[in-house]
Image (cartoon, rainbow, N blue to C red):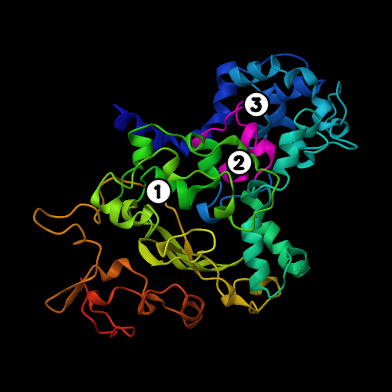
C-alpha cells in the first residue's frame, strides 16, 4: 500500500504545483462581493483576471529546470479552504496592510499598491515577521537557507578574495540572478510556492507551520535531493526512508536546523544542528561485519547510495551545464577532512569551471583550484542492500567494493575516482587532493599511474 501511495506522490509532485492555483477558484465558484478592498479583490477571481498586469517570467528552476508557469491572477488569488483557514487565523486577523502596507478599502489597483506597498513582506522580515517571531527571524537572517553562504564561499575563494563583498559588482549581480533564486524567505516556505515551483500563494494565503515536502522543499531541492529521494531516475527506487517510514524532509531536518542557529556557516556540513545517521541508527558498529570493519573508514552513503545525479562545467547565465547531467557514483578521498572524519567518501561532480563567470566580467577565476570540483555528497537515495553490500553466495563480503584483479580485469575500479576519470585539464588540477591513485591498499594491485588502457569491468 505504501508503494502505491508513493506512486501517486511522484506522479503528482509537479502537477499539483501547477493546478493548486486554479482548483481553489473552481471549487468556490468565484466568491461574490465587492472588489473595493484587498480581500474583496483578491477573492474575486474574475476581477483579478480583468485587472491582471502583463505577466512576468518567474525566475526559478535553476539546477532543477524551468519553473512551471502559473498565471499571475492565480498566483495572487485567495480562495478555497486555505483562505478560510487563513481568515480565521492569527495572521488573517492582522489585516492586509499590517504586513503589506499599501492602501485598503479601495478598488483602485494602483492606489492599493502605492506608497510603501510590499509585495513579499518576508523580504523585510525583521520589520514584518520579526514583530511576532523575533528569535526565528534573528537566527534565520544568517542561515544557509536565506543566504547560501556555502555557495558564496566557493565563489569568493575561487575569485582569489577573502570575503564575498570583495567580488565584482557584475559577479554579485550574476549570483543574485542565477544562484540566489532558490534561497528562501519565510514566505517561500510558509505561505507561497517558492520561485522554483512557479511562485505565488500556495493555498489561498494559508500559513503552513510545516512546509510541504513536495511543493516547498523539493520544488527547490530538486535535482540533488528530490530526484533521488523519489527514485525518479531510471534504474533507481525511492529512498528507504520514504518507502518504509514515510519520512518527509522534516523527519530528519529540524526546524531549528532550517531556521539556523545564528551562526554563519561557509559549508553546509559544518552546521551544528544537521542530522546524522547515528541519531536514529544507534549501536550500528557491532551490527554486522561491514560496520565493524568500516564504520570509521567512509560515510554511510558509500555503501548505501544508489547512483545519483551529476553534472558539471556550468556557464552562469549562459548555456548551463556543459557536462550534461548523468547518473553516476564515485568514491574519492574525503574533500572536507576538517569537517567530516572519513578517509573516503562519496563525491559528486559539481557545476563550477574556471570560466563559469565569463558572462559576468570574470574570464577566469583566479584561484579556481582552491576547491575541488568533485564535492563531498550525501545522496538521499538510500537502500539497505546495494550492489556493494549484496554479494553472491560464497563470495567474500568485499567482493563488490574492493578492486580485485580478476585474470587481468580490475573489477570494481569504476566505483573510485581516478585521475583517468577527469576529462578536462582544469578538472585534473583541481582534484589532485582527492583522487585515489596511489592511495588504495597495495594488495589491490594498483600503482599510482594506472595504465589508461587498463581493462575494466
Q: Is residue 406 left or right of residue 66?
A: left
User: CA–CA distance between discs 3 and 1?
Assistant: 28 Å
Please give the label number shown on residue 348. none
User: CA–CA distance between discs 2 and 1?
Assistant: 20 Å
In the rendered image, which quarter contains the C terminus?
Answer: bottom left
Depth order, front residue of 307/302: 302
User: CA–CA distance between discs 2 and 3?
Assistant: 17 Å
Q: Which residue is under mark 1?
A: 228
Determine whether the residue tagged by mark 1 lies in a helix, strand or loop: helix
Q: What stretch is highlighted in magenta?
A: 184-213
Could you tell me residue 84's position as x and y percent? 64, 16
Image quarter of residue 106: top right
Within-10-Å neighbours for mark 3: few <14, some 14–19, many 20+? many
Q: Which residue is drawn at 34% across and 83% down?
A: 448
Q: Which residue is drawn at 85% across and 28% down?
A: 108
Q: Which residue is under mark 2?
A: 258
Q: Which residue is under mark 3?
A: 207
Q: Is residue 140 left or right of residue 105?
A: left
Q: Do the residues labelled 2 and 3 touch (CB within 8 Å)?
A: no
Q: Which of marks 2 and 1 is in front?
A: 2
Could you tell me residue 269's position as x and y percent? 54, 54
Q: Is residue 356 left or right of residue 230?
A: right
Amino acid at each position: 500500500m505504501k508503494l502505491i501511495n508513493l506512486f501517486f506522490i511522484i506522479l503528482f509532485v509537479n502537477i499539483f504545483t501547477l493546478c493548486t492555483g486554479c482548483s481553489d477558484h473552481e471549487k468556490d465558484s468565484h466568491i461574490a462581493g465587492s472588489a473595493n478592498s484587498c480581500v474583496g479583490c483578491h477573492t474575486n477571481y474574475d476581477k483579478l483576471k480583468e485587472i491582471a498586469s502583463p505577466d512576468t517570467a518567474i525566475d526559478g528552476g535553476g539546477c532543477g529546470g524551468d519553473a512551471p508557469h502559473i498565471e499571475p491572477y492565480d498566483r495572487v488569488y485567495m480562495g478555497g479552504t486555505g483562505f478560510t483557514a487563513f481568515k480565521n487565523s492569527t495572521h488573517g486577523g492582522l489585516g492586509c496592510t499590517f504586513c503589506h502596507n499599501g492602501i485598503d478599502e479601495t478598488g483602485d489597483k494602483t492606489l492599493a499598491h502605492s506608497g510603501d506597498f510590499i509585495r513579499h513582506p518576508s523580504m523585510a522580515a525583521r520589520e514584518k515577521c520579526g514583530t511576532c517571531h523575533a528569535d526565528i527571524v534573528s537566527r534565520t537572517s544568517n542561515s544557509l537557507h536565506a543566504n547560501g553562504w556555502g555557495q558564496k564561499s566557493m565563489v569568493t575563494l575561487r575569485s582569489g578574495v577573502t570575503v564575498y563583498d570583495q567580488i565584482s559588482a557584475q559577479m554579485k549581480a550574476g549570483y543574485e540572478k542565477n544562484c540566489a533564486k532558490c534561497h528562501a524567505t519565510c514566505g517561500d516556505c510558509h505561505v507561497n510556492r517558492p520561485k522554483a515551483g512557479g511562485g505565488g500563494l500556495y493555498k489561498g494565503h494559508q500559513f503552513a507551520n510545516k512546509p510541504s515536502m513536495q511543493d516547498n522543499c523539493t520544488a527547490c531541492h530538486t535535482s540533488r535531493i528530490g530526484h533521488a529521494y523519489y527514485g525518479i531516475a531510471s534504474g533507481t527506487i525511492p529512498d528507504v526512508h520514504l518507502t518504509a517510514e514515510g519520512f518527509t524532509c522534516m523527519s530528519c531536518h529540524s526546524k531549528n536546523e532550517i531556521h539556523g542557529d545564528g551562526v554563519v556557516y561557509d559549508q553546509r556540513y559544518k552546521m551544528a544542528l544537521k542530522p546524522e545517521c547515528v541519531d536514529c541508527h544507534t549501536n550500528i558498529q557491532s551490527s554486522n561485519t561491514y560496520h565493524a570493519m568500516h564504520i570509521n573508514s567512509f560515510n554511510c552513503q558509500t555503501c548505501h547510495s544508489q547512483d545519483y545525479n551529476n553534472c558539471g562545467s556550468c556557464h552562469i547565465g549562459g548555456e548551463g551545464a556543459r557536462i550534461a547531467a548523468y547518473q553516476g557514483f564515485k568514491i574519492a578521498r574525503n574533500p572536507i577532512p576538517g569537517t567530516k572524519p572519513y578517509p573516503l567518501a562519496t563525491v559528486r561532480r559539481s557545476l563550477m569551471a574556471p570560466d563559469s563567470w565569463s558572462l559576468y566580467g570574470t574570464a577566469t577565476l583566479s584561484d579556481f583550484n582552491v576547491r575541488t570540483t568533485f564535492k563531498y555528497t550525501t545522496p538521499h537515495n538510500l537502500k539497505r542492500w546495494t550492489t556493494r553490500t549484496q554479494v553472491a553466495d560464497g563470495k567474500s563480503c568485499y567482493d563488490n567494493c574492493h578492486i580485485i584483479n580478476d585474470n587481468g580485469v580490475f573489477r570494481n575500479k569504476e566505483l573510485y575516482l581516478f585521475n583517468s576519470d577527469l576529462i578536462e585539464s582544469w578538472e585534473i588540477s583541481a582534484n589532485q587532493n582527492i583522487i585515489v591513485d596511489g592511495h588504495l591498499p597495495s594488495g589491490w594491485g594498483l600503482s599510482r599511474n594506472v595504465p589508461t588502457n587498463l581493462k575494466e569491468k
